[in-house]
Image (cartoon, rainbow, N blue to C red):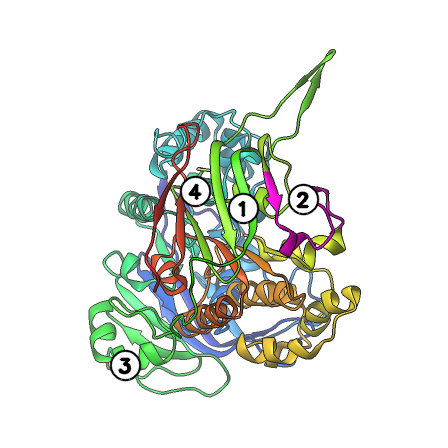
Amino acid sequence: MSATQNGAVRPAAISAEGWGWRHSGRAQAAIQGLDLRIEPGERVLLLGPSGAGKSTLLHALAGVLGDEEDDSDETGSLLIDGVAPREQRGRAGLMQQDPETQVVLSRVGDDVAFGAENLAVPREEIWARVHEALDDVGLRTAAGGGLALDHPTAALSGGQKQRLALAGILAMRPGLILLDEPTANLDPAGVLEVRDAVGRCLDKTGATLVVVEHRVSVWKDLVDRIVVLQPGSTAVHGSAGGTSATGGVLLDGPPDQVLSEARTMLMSAGVWVPGYVPATRERRNETHAAPLLLAAQDLAVSREKPRRKRFKTIPPVPVQTGISAQVRAGQALTITGPNGAGKSTFALTLAGLLAPVDGKVSAAVDLSQGAGIDPYRWKAEQLISRIGTVFQEPEHQFVTGNVLDELMFGPKHLGHGEERVDELLERLRLTHLVDANPYTLSGGEKRRLSVATVLAAHPKVLVLDEPTFGQDANTWAELASFLSELLDAGTAVVSVTHDQEFSTVLGGTELRLGPVHQGEATRQAAGAA
């Protein structure tokens, strides 16, 4: 069933009656008892605490849920235009939480064209759509990197990959657009670009929209309706809109009405309502005379490797040059800057996972403890017990089949005690998931697990890439407070983030990287929280 009719997009209708889904290997359903109706062309913001089943619902609507789950269980019915989503794949376009998983081809233009090609769109129309979609998400502008169609997708930053995934969906012109945290890893300017791009697409096509985003203020003026899901199996009846809401729906109504009449309830459920920042533990011990652990001097960084051409070795092209920074015990270093500026690349180089193109990273004696001055030359067990790194994509860190084994993996291999595991499970709200497969967790749960697995190894330096991605307000506050405690206990915390509230909680120093290929990084001090 095509998403277009007579050359125009045909907006989709969604209906759920008592619908629920239990993932393979999970005792509890991710979502159950959902009764919901979304009319063609409606724009819906889907909210709820981390783990309420928001991503599960979006995957089901895209027709991709359960393909690799042998003993998963579905109850009730979920339909698009009266037909099961699996029977009409392509009717919906899904942007997942991790855009890395959606990059298919090696060149930007080809990747954007991929979905439209699979829908048998005429070739001449495909490339017009590709150009338009890339313009809409800002990837062809100077601020977005000015990317050519043959630009390699492997060279994109996480934020650029997020925009690329969105461009591929827009080029498909689906009747239902599903967005799962579409702006979570973007800089403030990129957030507005992506939101406005979605708005332009909806205005042109009239497609139905369901967007999951913890930050309500970004989307509330673009949507017609807010639907709040609740975790667990107990239904709460009633809605801010005055219509009885049953099953997995906690609240349902116009944005302003929901936000004004149920503000306190939403905050208690962990929803990021406009103007709300949850209380966190205050720093107690910050000192500027703390011991030096790591230092970067005149660093040039790149994810590329040297290439051989005939008899010459061609060095990588650096994404940033001239970076100098210090990491001290018990202090926070926050790395900020626009998407594509090389923040993650610098963090990975500082953590000893990438070799510098130029300059050097040096470990002090307090950190190296006999392993040598260069972290890049340390053995794996030496590295993880000294510098713990949480990647932007949590799945890249998982190595076992359940949450408990994942947490115990590091301590067991390092010969450490496992006394911290129970504390981490409780503090990061993972206790009820000990038997779950890490890959079936929600995006926020995966992020908290990836942080916990690194902390279990007791590193002196913690390097976090977008640590608050996918967190509701309650889990955000718990994570920020926990990291504040670690700082006061002497752990150094390095964070790549666009989250200004999080930076304020941790305090310390800000290292701001400028746009790609525009000279040295600049540093500015940020006051302690």
Check residue 264 in the rendering and tell me which mark sits there, or answer none.
3
Measured as percent of width and height from the top left, residue 40 is found at 33, 59
Q: Nearer the viewer, residue 225 or 389?
A: 389
Q: Tell me, yes or no, whether the highlighted magenta stretch contains residue 367.
A: yes
Amino acid residing under circle 2: Ile
Q: Earlier in the sequence, mark 3 or mark 4?
A: 4
Q: CA distance from mark 3 to mark 4?
A: 34 Å
Q: Return the mark for residue 347.
A: 1
- State the separation of the CA atoms marked 2 and 1: 17 Å
Marks 3/2: CA–CA distance: 52 Å
Name the residue type under label 1: Ala
Residue 491 % position (x, y): 55, 63
Magenta stretch, residue numbers = 361-379
For the question of whether residue 315 can be seen, the reply is: yes
Whether pointer 3 and pointer 2 mark residues with C-beta atoms closer than 8 Å, the reply is no
Mark 1 and mark 4 lie on one chain; the one further toward the N terminus is 4
Q: Which residue is mark 2?
A: 373
**In this rendering, the label closer to the viewer, 3 or 1:** 1
Q: Which circle's residue, 2 or 4, is located before the other in the chain? A: 4
